[in-house]
Amino acid sequence: MKKLRVELGERSYPIYIGSGLLSQSELITSHIKSKQVVVVTNETIAPLYLEAVLKNLAGYSVETVILPDGEQFKTLDFVSQIFDKLLSCKFSRNATLIALGGGVVGDMGGFAAACYQRGIAFLQIPTTLLAQVDSSVGGKTGVNHPLGKNMIGAFYQPQCVIADADVLDTLDDRQLSAGLAEVIKYGLIRDLEFFEWLENNIDALLARDKQALAYAIERSCINKAEIVAEDETETGIRATLNLGHTFGHALETGAGYGKFLHGEAVAIGTCQAADLSKRLGWLDEGDVTRIIGLFKKARLPVEPPEDMDAARFLDLMAVDKKNVDGQIRLILLEKIGIATLPVDVALDLLEMTLKTYGRR
């Protein structure tokens, strides 16, 4: 087992990475504050791993909330199901919430924990590659709104993150690829050596080679932990983690939540960001080809659907947390391995990318 640490002073917490971690009860129980525990999961994960987690909680007063599976259910209405359970069971502010699932469960569970009685403890047990390398680390929690993704939420750090690589054995191929989009992101924004490693090892990752996956998870979490420790609430360098996300979030919202997995939308958005970076003179054609090529090798989409035109993109990109005074601000690439902080982009160049990239 590897143990990393997100250094945030009194809010610091460990990330455990390894195999067989769900059977190590002390990893979970050592971070529980009282006998009251609620496990939040979804209909896909519950039959696979809920029993394994509950076995660790003998002697605790445990309740479960099983949500429907999918981005389209990441709403205030479904978060209310968690509040209903906590209130009906008279859980106190010393209770602990365990989020067992992918990024949607983690975001919703974390948001509920942040809000219930103004904050209860919660643990992240991510069950998708994307959640293990990205969304479970850093304390971003929240839900979607019909007008914008993740626009309702809070920064709220977990007590720990338990990333058991064995749960990836039941992850379908599409979800595995979606997680690789966020892994590739770390190489692009700050870790050229890792990007080059990914170019050479993408086939091993797709084949679920245990050693390759363990290295990719660890390297991604190290990058994420370092960024979060430096900038917890995204006032500076943490914004670089949003490479491709402004495009991607617009795509997810415009297409309808659930049509694209988050990682798929980020892959398309990152390719659009690379195209725009080239138009600004930062990347050359060879760089863009390498970036698109790696996403393709990861079996990810790289072009937006035809029904998402430039006007629709621009309308939805205007609803983004990085924007200031109505100006769309984007994370772009100065070169592979170096991302910009949010930059204002001339509308004509942005429109050129939206109108021409991936449009046959």
Image: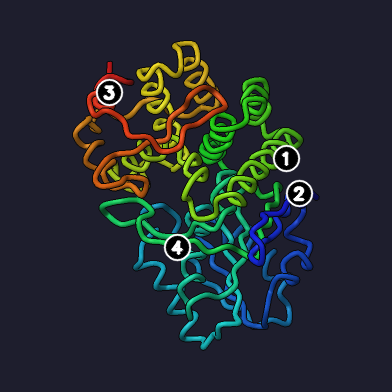
Q: Which residue is mark 4?
A: 154
The number of numbered discs placed on residues in the rendered structure image is: 4
Lateral position of residue 123 relative to residue 145, left or right: right
Q: Residues within 10 Å of mark 1 (few under 14, many from 20)?
A: many
> Residue 211 at x, y = what percent?
76, 35
Q: Is residue 293 above or below residue 323?
A: above
* CB-based contact (under 8 Å), mark 3 and mark 1: no
> Which comes before the other along the chain, label 1 or label 4?
4
Amino acid carrying label 2: it is Gly
What secondary structure is marked by label 3? Answer: helix
> Residue 145 at x, y = what percent?
30, 57
Residue located farthest toward the left when viewing the structure as drawn: 311
Q: Which residue is mark 3?
A: 349
Amino acid carrying label 4: it is Ala
Circle on res. 214: 1
Amino acid carrying label 3: it is Leu
Circle nearer the viewer, 3 or 4: 3
Q: Which residue is mark 2?
A: 18
Q: Residues within 10 Å of mark 3 (few under 14, many from 20)?
A: some
What secondary structure is marked by label 2? Answer: strand
Q: Tell me what residue is drawn at x 59 percent, y 53 percent.
A: 137
Q: Tell me what residue is drawn at x 40 percent, y 16 percent.
A: 281
Lateral position of residue 57 relative to residue 244, left or right: right
Circle nearer the viewer, 3 or 1: 3
Circle nearer the viewer, 3 or 2: 3
Q: Tell me what residue is drawn at x 78 percent, y 48 percent.
A: 2
Q: Tell me what residue is drawn at x 30 percent, y 51 percent.
A: 148
Q: Is residue 45 above or below residue 35?
A: above
* CB-based contact (under 8 Å), mark 2 and mark 1: yes
What secondary structure is marked by label 1? Answer: helix
> In front here: 76 or 22?
76
